[in-house]
Image: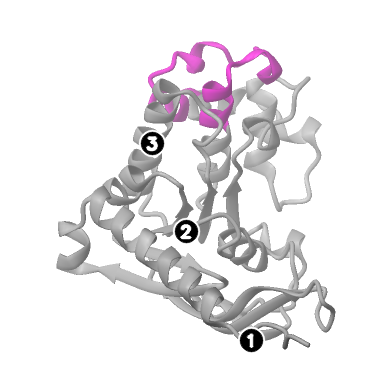
Amino acid sequence: MLTLDDVSVAFNAGTANEIRALQQVSLSVDDGEFVTVIGANGAGKSSLFNVIAGTAPVDSGRIVLDHADITWWPEYRRSQMIGRVFQDPAMGTCPGLTIRENLSLAAIHGRGAGLRQGVKKDQDAWFVERLAHEHLGLEYRLDSDVGMLSGGQRQAITLVMATLIKPRLLLLDEHTAALDPHAAGQIISLTRELAESHELTVIMITHSMQQACMLGDRIIMMHQGRIEFDIAGEERRKLRPADLVERFHALEDDAEIGERDRPGPARI
């Protein structure tokens, strides 16, 4: 479904402030696979999502999605194939519009229709059916302004909007990090249900080792712009959060040793 071949991205290239966000990253994700991505801040996780979604250009390498080379496609064109849910619940919905209107926008996405043509009463049964799976009672509040909903409710609406028309790829960018533990648990349950029922191809960034072990078929750990390990199969099923924490600390320790061993400026 998705292939990245030797993708590299650098910011402020050629200067003293150069940051190598991605360093020759290669990754293949199968149709229907659920991959979780972990790593410290600055490891390259968001840069990985940005080059896939088209919000950041690559310096070198190639990106193929569903047999199409999308390396140089603009973001708006990719958005017809890719759904993305951000950390901030406010980024996925339009305040001032009702739940019905927000869902209608998702339903007409990519068709070139306006909102007036998209809001149709005969879609209500479809919207009610999809919202009922959230178990939040939102199916009875189609005329409510999404700006009046809680963060967890808005994120649930965002998830439904991102999957209303099945995307070829769903990117979940720390989509529970801004929520309280109860709301985060509800969103994780909804995530699992949507991924399984619609057979979605999902890549999820998380800082929660528990979530990484609980969801998905593979775990990828990134460090300094590289994929340091990629675990699947029986090894993945046996992993516990403590195992991931141990591997994470080992990477940090190795990086610290490398910095200490790097030769400094000569003394005069």
Q: Amino acid at mark 3?
A: Ile
Q: CA distance from mark 2 to mark 1?
A: 22 Å
Looking at the rendered structure, the secondary structure element under dot 1 is strand
Question: Front-most of 255 and 12?
Answer: 255
Closer to the N terminus: mark 3 or mark 1?
A: 1
Looking at the rendered structure, the secondary structure element under dot 2 is loop
Q: Determine the image quadrant of residue 262.
A: bottom right
Q: Residue furthest front?
A: 268
Closer to the N terminus: mark 2 or mark 1?
A: 2
161 to 170, vertically: above or below:
above
x and y percentages locating residue 175 in the rendered image: 53, 40
Looking at the rendered structure, the secondary structure element under dot 3 is helix
- The quadrant of the picture occupied by the C terminus is bottom right
Q: Amino acid at mark 2?
A: Gly
Q: Write the start and end of the magenta stretch as one range.
A: 128-157
Residue marked by disc 1: 61
Q: Which mark is residue 39?
A: 2
Q: Which mark is residue 188?
A: 3
x and y percentages locating residue 147 in the rendered image: 70, 18
For the point 83% across and 84% down, the residue is 14
80 to 208, vertically: above or below:
below
Q: CA distance from mark 3 to mark 1?
A: 33 Å
For the point 20% across and 68% down, the residue is 233
For the point 56% across and 31% down, the residue is 178
Contact flag, marks 3 and 1 (Cβ < 8 Å): no
260 to 190, vertically: above or below:
below
